[in-house]
Amino acid sequence: MTRRVFRYVPFTIVQDQTAEPEYEARCVSGEESECGARSGTYSAPGPVEEWQRQHTQETGHRRYRRDFGDYAVLCPSSEPVAPPELVARVRPAGREP
Ligand SMILES: [Zn+2]
């Protein structure tokens, strides 16, 4: 039996800029059954937080499940230049594109 030796290839993991990240919240308040109201999916956390504040004001519900999703791409370090559409762009903090 031969042992196969895998060469370790270092990868850089970057966020796929071609797919927007997804933020969502669901109201899980309630004693016997959850409220279940959903914020809908947004590409930034702001609108989700705004929805939460509004829902809390209307209902008094104060507990939420938050979901965040994004896509990641692994670029072999032997190819230091990732396809331009996949390279995470560094943006000044707090500014939307
Ligand atoms: Zn609720």
Image (cartoon, helix red, strand yellow):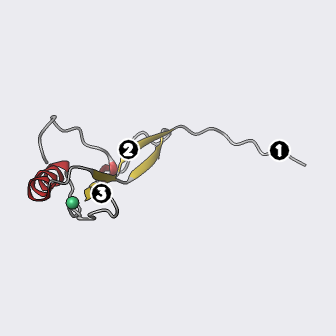
Q: Does 83 appear above or below 37? A: above
Q: Which picture quadrant has residue 61?
A: bottom left
**Element under disc 3:** loop
Q: Does 75 appear above or below 37? A: above
The Cα atoms of the two marked residues, 2 and 1, are separated by 32 Å
The Cα atoms of the two marked residues, 1 and 3, are separated by 51 Å
**Element under disc 1:** loop
Residue 65, position as x, y percentages in the image:
31, 53
Task: Of the two numbered discs 2 and 3 on the same chain, state the one appearing first in sequence.
Answer: 2
Residue ID for mark 3? 28
User: Which amino acid, mark 2?
Assistant: Val
Residue lying furthest top in this view?
93
Residue lying furthest front in this view?
32
In the image, what residue occupies the spot 78% across and 45% down? 4
Few, some or many residues within 10 Å of mark 3 (<14, 14–19, 20+): some
Residue ID for mark 2? 14
Q: How many marks?
A: 3
Label of residue 93 in the image: none
Task: Of the two numbered discs 1 and 3 on the same chain, state the one appearing first in sequence.
Answer: 1
The Cα atoms of the two marked residues, 2 and 3, are separated by 32 Å
Query: Under 8 Å from ligand 1: the CB of mark 2?
Result: no
Contact, mark 2 vs mark 1 (Cβ under 8 Å): no
In the image, what residue occupies the spot 32% across and 58% down? 31
Point out the frontmost of discs 2 and 3.
3
Residue ID for mark 1? 3
For the residue pair 60 and 38, the one nearer the viewer reads as 60
